[in-house]
Amino acid sequence: VVQRDPPYLQGLNKEQREAVEATDGPVLVLAGAGTGKTRVLTTRLAHILSSRKAWPSQLLCVTFTNKAAREMKERIGALIGGVVEGMQWLGTFHSIGARMLRHHAELVGRKSNFTIIDTDDQLRLMKQLLEAENIDEKRWPARTLASMIDGWKNRGLKPADVPDGEAHGFANGKGKKLYHLYQERLKALNACDFGDLLLDVLSILREHPDVLADYRERFRYILVDEYQDTNTVQYLWLKLLAGGGTGARGNVCVVGDDDQSIYGWRGAEVENILRFERDFPGAKVIRLERNYRSTPAILAAASGLIAANKGRLGKTLWTEGDTGEKLQVKGVWDAEEEARNVASEIENLRRKGHPYSQMAILVRASFQMREFEDRFVSLGLPYKVIGGPRFYERAEIRDAMAYLRLVAQGDDDLAFERIVNKPKRGIGDASVQVLHQFARMRQMPLLAAAREIVETDELPPKAKKALTELTQSFYRWTEVSRQIPHTELAEMILDESGYTDMLKADKSAEAPGRLDNLKELVRSMDGFESLAAFLEHIALVMDVEQNDSEDRINLMTLHAAKGLEFDTVFLPGWEEGLFPSQRTMDENGLAGLEEERRLAYVGITRAKKRAFLSFAANRRVHGSWQSALPSRFISELPEEHVETAVDEGFYGGNAGFRDNLSGFASTYDSPGWKRAQANKAQGYTRAKPPLIEAQAWSVSTSDPTASLYQRGDRVFHQKFGYGRVKAVEGNKLTVDFDKAGEKKVIDQFVSRG
Ligand code: ATP
Ligand code: MG
């Protein structure tokens, strides 16, 4: 009997099909951009499900972004219909990690409703630790500590595992201790950071054989996209779950491209590709060579560029069809002109019938986006920002989220600190410090401590009143959160807290946009069944916009563009220092440069039909003007596939200069350069964000509830002076002060007078 191929297999080439059908045993698909790696993974899932080798809940599939996971789910649904709903383990390493950790939080000393903190909170915590340890933050910045700790976590190292030598680099050998203290602090807050989502799961799998055995039993097939960007801890997960040992099934399929490894700076180890064959014996290695995405011109340009890299595994790529349009490279005067050019090119294309959604602008650094956003807004062109936590990183969104987090988890101190005086309600830093001190003595969360301290006179009347109202509000919100939809709750909180009014009263140009953002936030909550589910999503979310129904231009960083494709791709800002990024080159030398080049390769290979590159002669980077040279990557593109044009504006409007110049390197003589120098000379400083003062994490050893004083004792209080104790109630004293009159104070805040 000849069996017809199921439709989902039709159209695959021989190698792709082999990768789909080799379901059992380890498989490594190593192939260049646009060769169908993601398509292979998707089809493989469909194949496993439709041949009933596993239930949806028995598949573990890792994608690089949450958006990619959603799309994969949709694709599988389209291929084989209904069953995809049960695929609970399809997501990023982080979202899968969070899910596992909630099941087993108690094994690593947490409660299952732990909060996932973002980098902002992470830095704040570290600053507090540094201060408590009397470490000069100017010499040893919290940011440095944060990246050290992230680095250790990415490598699967707990504080005790960090080699002593490595910790010496920070604050005279205190790095390891600080890592330990930071972890303790997170545990006390019932919180974890992104690195913990990976590291804690690894610890659980390593230290709890029963849990490991359960997961080995459950996950019949494991699939990983963008494998070249896995880090060590993720690799170790895979090895434990699938790589030999009792009960491990060994059915693991990873797909990747060493030329697209662009997250080395975040701990990704491209060597994981080489390790795979060693650690998963008998692994089948499949190479795909036909590119289905791009025109020959685009593919040739990208291949020519990446050939300049030394550290490559090397591969062949070919594609069919007409050569296609050459890459357009354009020099312009500055970023404003660059944005104008791109926008008018977009309008051209649109007039010819190309949809906006098939156009993307890929920037090296997110600050480059603003210029494009401004331009689009003024022309009324619809656009969306993809990937990167930009939307949720905005201050007003973070504030709103802090309120919601605190309602969901009353002991989220970081959230409390963020909003206690936002909007301003007269609770100054000094009051917050008193509250901090009290909370620490009593070892309770700030919100609970606030409820107690407002029963005394320790805070100035205004602060006391404001804090009383705030704690009462939180009490009420927490109560109603169980009764009303979470979108209504969010609106209620924004109104009742005074946050909306604050923005309405704000006459600055940004305020209306901020209000819109908050509305958008409430709208986005609609898609989640509960506040908890929403908060979980936010903590993990990497990609922002989900409303794909409207036809819009895509704006994103090159890093966020991984795996995506568009008919037309704009690649602005190809200038030395910006791209390749000076910082990356300074920090990582040649390896850094090669990673930048891979990023350029990723950028060009996103294009199906056309790519526009541009570079500006002058650029304002973080507020100061810099003159720039075209990126070396431009000169590395094979000439026959590139068409270069330099705009009049490139020379500051003085076309005569062009005749005197040979090559872009002479830009330094142009009037534009001189103007940039003048601008630079004006100088620019950035305001430092205010920080809530931190104090040592000293914990009093005495029983915190027993009062040290009794009626009739003479006492001294920092603020109210001398007085006599009139009444004692727990650790609260009513004192008749000589000058200030009768006040209620906390006993730990007085001394014998
Ligand atoms: P990247 O390295 O950029 O992630 P990739 O290798 O994952 O790329 P896919 O995104 O899976 O490549 O595929 C690139 C494009 O080629 C997609 O539009 C996909 O639908 C198409 N494609 C892949 N295989 C085939 C095929 N056999 N026939 C027709 N089109 C294909
Ligand atoms: Mg892909």
Image (cartoon, rainbow, N blue to C red):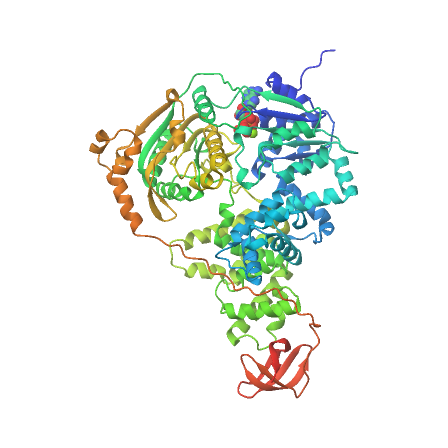
**Residue 499 visible somewhere in the drawing:** yes
- Outermost residue to the top: 1
510 and 182: which is toward the camera: 182
**Residue 100 visible somewhere in the drawing:** no
Q: Residue at x 62, y 25 (%)?
A: 29
Residue 538 to residue 241: above or below:
below
Number of numbered discs present?
0
The spot of residue 104 in percent (x, y) is 73, 48
278 and 243: which is toward the camera: 278
Residue 191, picture quadrant:
bottom right
Q: Residue at x 58, y 50 (%)?
A: 168
Q: Residue at x 41, y 61 (%)?
A: 505
The spot of residue 440 in percent (x, y) is 63, 67
The spot of residue 5 in percent (x, y) is 67, 17
Residue 412, picture quadrant:
bottom right
Locate ligand 1 by image quadrant.
top right
Left-right relation of 397 to 109: left
The spot of residue 628 in percent (x, y) is 34, 38
Q: Quadrant of the C terminus?
A: bottom right
Residue 234, picture quadrant:
top right
224 and 467: which is toward the camera: 224
Q: Quadrant of the N terminus?
A: top right
